[in-house]
Amino acid sequence: VDRQRLVAIGVEGGHEDGRRADNKQHERAQGQGNALDPGHGKVQRNGLRLLPLPRLLECKPMQSFDVCVRGAGIVGRSLALALSRQGLAVALQAPESAAPAREDVRAYALNAASVALLEQLKVWPAIPASSRTPVYDMRVEGDRPAAVLRFSAWQQQVRELAWIVDAAVLEAELAAALRYAPHVQQVAEPVPAALLVLAEGKASSTRDRLGI
C-alpha cells in the first residue's frame, strides 16, 4: 500500500498495559515480516504504530467565509476591510492585475463620508499630503451662459467640499492595509460564502451572467 495514507497511533508510555500491548504488537509485526512498515507497515521503535487510513476517512481542510467580495477596486477593498473589522471572514476575489503599461494619472473625488470611512480603516492618514487635494469651492456651468451653480465650503459650513486623491496611491494604501487584515483572504477563484458582493465595476462579468 505505497500510496495509502498512514495514521500514527501513539501508545501511552506511562501505562503498563500500553507497553505490553505495544511489545506484543512489535513482536507480532516482526514475526509477520514487514507487513505494517510505512513502505512495509512495521511497528516503529518509538512507540508509534502506522496503520492504513481508508480514503473515505481522509479529512480535507475547508475554509468557510461569511462574505465573498468580487472585485478589488477601492470599493471592494474598502468593504473587505470594513467587514473584517466587524470580525467577519471575508474572501476578496480579483483577477491578477498586470503591471500598468504607463503611469496611472487617474484621480478619485471623495466626499466627506468616504473620507470618514477611510479614516476609520486607518488608510486616510497613510496617504501623503502630496497625493490628496481639498476642494473648497465648486463652479458648475451648464450649456446656457446663465446656467451656473456655485458651491462653497464656507457657505456649507464644512472644512472642505470634497477631496481629490491620486487613484494609484489610494489603491496601494488599501492593498497594504489588506495585508494586515486578519480576517481577509485574497482568492483567485469563486468560493462559497453566505453573502456575495459584486464590486467589479461597470464591466461586471458576474453581473452579466446573473442577468442583473
Image (tube, rainbow, N blue to C red):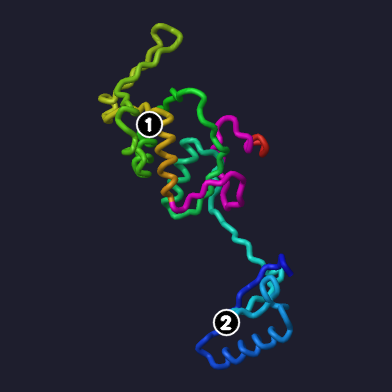
The residue labelled by disc 2 is: 47
Q: Which picture quadrant has residue 152?
A: top left
Q: What's the magenta region? A: 182-207
> Residue 140 sits in which quadrant?
top left
User: Going from the N terminus, do you reach mark 1 or mark 2 first?
Assistant: 2
Q: Is residue 40 left or right of residue 78?
A: right
Q: As drawn, is 30 to the left or to the right of 69?
A: right
**At which x and y percent is residue 191?**
61, 49
Across and down, in percent, residue 4 comes to: 71, 67
Q: Image quadrant for the C terminus?
A: top right
Q: Residue at x 25, y 25 (%)?
A: 154
For image coordinates 40% across by 13% down, the residue present is: 141
**Could you say which is closer to the camera, residue 56 or residue 205?**
56
Which residue lies under the disc numbered 1? 111
Residue 47 vertical position relative to residue 55 in the rendered view, above or below: below
**Alpha carbons under labels 1 and 2: distance apart:** 67 Å
Identity of the amino acid at label 1? Answer: Asn
Q: Is residue 83 depicted above or below 20 in this figure?
A: above
